[in-house]
Image (spheres, rainbow, N blue to C red):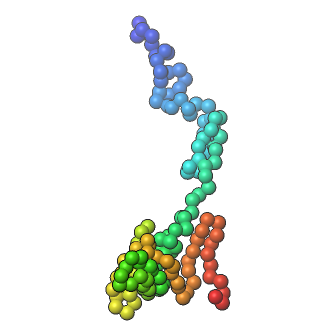
């Protein structure tokens, strides 16, 4: 005499399916789901709902400077309420840049200077810059 209930009523029993096979693989043997790009979702019926387009690095000063490490720039800074000097100019090679600071190396002394972007007015370079913005690839304009 067999066990009460047998294997017929038990999940994963021998109803024509190998035990341990996931339920979702029954129908389309050998079919694979559609590829889902990162950030996309799968909607009802298994359709892929496209996510947002790929993000480019935003055009903040630190990102622009990071794309131009090793280039020499002239940094124009303003220091309000400073009795010794209100404005100062620094020239150096861009070594690093963060959200609130820029590190340059003085080409003649080798001294490293940390500049706070809070005080930055503008920067000049005497060579073409690497620059990317969403949908725009920066390239040097010949003769400029």
Image label count: 0
User: In front here: 85 or 16?
Assistant: 85
Percent position (x, y) of residue 3?
40, 10
Q: Which residue is depicted at the point 52% across and 84% down?
A: 124
Outermost residue toward the bottom in this view: 108
State the image coordinates of residue 23 (x, y, percent, origin top left).
53, 29
State which quarter of the image contains the N terminus.
top left
Percent of width and height locating residue 85: 38, 84
Whether residue 113 is situated above or below residue 35 in the rendered picture: below
Residue in view at x 40 percent, y 73 percent:
116
Q: Residue at x 59, y 43 (%)?
A: 41
The residue lying at 60 percent from left, 36 percent from top is 29
Is residue 77 something that shows in the picture?
yes
Q: Nearer the viewer, residue 80 or 96?
A: 80
> Which residue is farthest top?
1
Q: In the rendered view of the protein, which quadrant contains the C terminus?
A: bottom right
Is the residue 73 above or below the residue 138 in the image? below
Asked whether, in this view, residue 45 is left or right of residue 104, the answer is: right
In this rendered view, identify the residue nearer to me: 87 or 7. 87
- Give the x, y percent position of residue 105: 38, 84
Rendered position, 81 above or below 47: below
* Residue 70 in sight in this render: no
């Amino acid at each position: 005499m067999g066990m009460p209930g047998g294997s017929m009523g038990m999940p994963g029993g021998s109803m024509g399916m190998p035990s341990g096979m996931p339920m979702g693989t029954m129908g389309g043997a050998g079919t694979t789901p559609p590829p889902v790009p990162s950030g996309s979702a799968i909607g009802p019926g298994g359709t892929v709902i496209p996510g947002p387009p790929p993000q480019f690095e935003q055009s903040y000063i630190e990102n622009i400077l990071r794309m131009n490490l090793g280039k020499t720039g002239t940094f124009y800074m303003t220091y309000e309420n400073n009795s010794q000097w209100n404005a100062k100019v620094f020239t150096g090679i861009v070594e690093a840049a963060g959200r609130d600071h820029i590190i340059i190396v003085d080409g003649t002394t080798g001294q490293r200077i940390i500049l706070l972007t809070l005080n930055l007015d503008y920067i000049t370079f005497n060579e073409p810059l690497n620059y990317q913005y969403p949908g725009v690839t920066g390239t040097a304009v010949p003769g400029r």
